[in-house]
Image (cartoon, grey):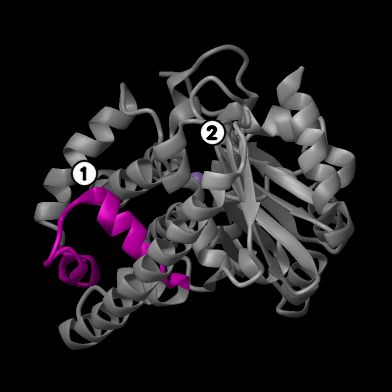
Amino acid sequence: MEKLRDTKKTVLRIAQALKNQEKIALFADDDTDGIVSAVMMFEILQKLGFRKLKIYLAERGSRGHIGLTKNDVLKFKSKNIKLIITLDCGTDDEKDIVLAKKLGIDTIVVDHHLINLRNPKALTFLNPQQIRGSSPLKHFSTAGLVYKLAGALSKYFNKDLAPSSFLDLVAISTIFDRSKIKGGNKLFVDKGKKVLSQTKRIGLKELAKKNTDLEILGRKLNVAPALSLDLLLTVKDKNSAQKLVNKIDRLFHLKNKQIQKSFQSIQETLKFSGKQEFIFIGDKTWPNNIIGCLALKLLKKYQKPIFVYTKIGKYYIGSARAPQKYNLVKIMKKCSPLLLNFGGHAQAAGFTLEPSCLNKFEICLRNVFNK
Ligand SMILES: [Mn+2]
């Protein structure tokens, strides 16, 4: 299999950071893939001897944008951080990566999202989407990419970082991100199930007690990012793990109820609307953490592109899902002047816009789909 471009440069930069005991920020998306990638990277770097590590989650809801912001970069500067490793985010954050560079902070991007900006300015850019043509790496979750990087680090430092011990987490993220399950991904899932059944990670073991289904585990880890982070990093204390699992389970049930309720009201609404090429629907009262699930549920039922939005603070944020033959990022690119942010994958993406652009965006989409 191909190597990820920039792997060597990344390994060398990490070696330099180790030599100087630099402070590192692991900056991750706050979904399941981001969380498990951060946990993996944290433990891998710890095994290499890093002591000044901290995980920061990009809270997508509160800012309507998944990735670095100016505030994050300034905060890292004030904490004397010298290296940022973005996980499952960072691909299009050129502006903030340039700002970090100016302030003396290097950025390593580890991400699998489609690339909108042509010339990413990160010191190293581990994103398989820059490979021309087809490659199995393009279907990896970010956790899968971290697994690959762990292999390269093991080799360089001549240290057994036991990358396979992380395959339970890789498998969960692979399923959660709805990656194509063939080739390397199939291997991750098959081996991951075995690793999960013997996991020494007490937190994960507790979470998997009721249900070992990888999709359910992924959805549970996605409910409360900060709690999940604590849970996955819990390797010894069974008591605190149980408490965390109880909290997560309760939130998971609550979320499912909310999804069910909104889903029903959407179905009522759709009964009266005509046959459209796509569904564009939203409600200010829907919690932002359910819109992705709602979009997926609608996709499963209606088999056409779905755009679901809600309002957070000043902005509308949305989640889109589509059947195989569509590329949502390309579609939204055609309406990009109306959007503050957009990005993701061909069949699962997100967007943010000003209230004044909401109707215009729907009209623009209608034009794109009717062409
Ligand atoms: Mn991901």
- Residue 128 in view in this figure: yes
**Residue pushed farthest front?**
272
**Of residues 332 and 3, the one drawn nearer to the viewer in this rendering:** 332
Q: CA distance from mark 1 to mark 2?
A: 27 Å
Secondary structure beneath dot 2 equals loop
User: Which of pointers 1 and 2 lies earlier in the amino acid sequence?
Assistant: 1
Left or right of 272 in this view: 168: left
Q: Amino acid at mark 2?
A: Ala
Magenta includes 216?
yes
| Percent position of residue 266, x then y | 51, 55
* Quarter occupied by residue 44: bottom left
Residue 324 point in image, percent of width and height = 49, 24
The residue under label 1 is which amino acid type?
A: Gly
Q: Quarter of the image for the N terminus: give it.
A: top left
* Residue highlighted by disc 2: 322
Provide the residue designation for mark 1: 192
Instruction: Please state the horizontal and vertical placement of residue 141, each as a whole percent of the image.
Output: 44, 40
Label 2 Cα neighbours within 10 Å, binned few <14 / some 14-19 / many ≥20: many
Using the image, determine if residue 18 lies above or below residue 88. below
Q: Nearer the viewer, residue 198 or 335?
A: 335
Q: Which residues are magenta?
A: 200-225
Compared with 41, 163 (above or below) is: above
- Where is residue 186, by image quadrant? top left
**For residue 207: magenta?**
yes
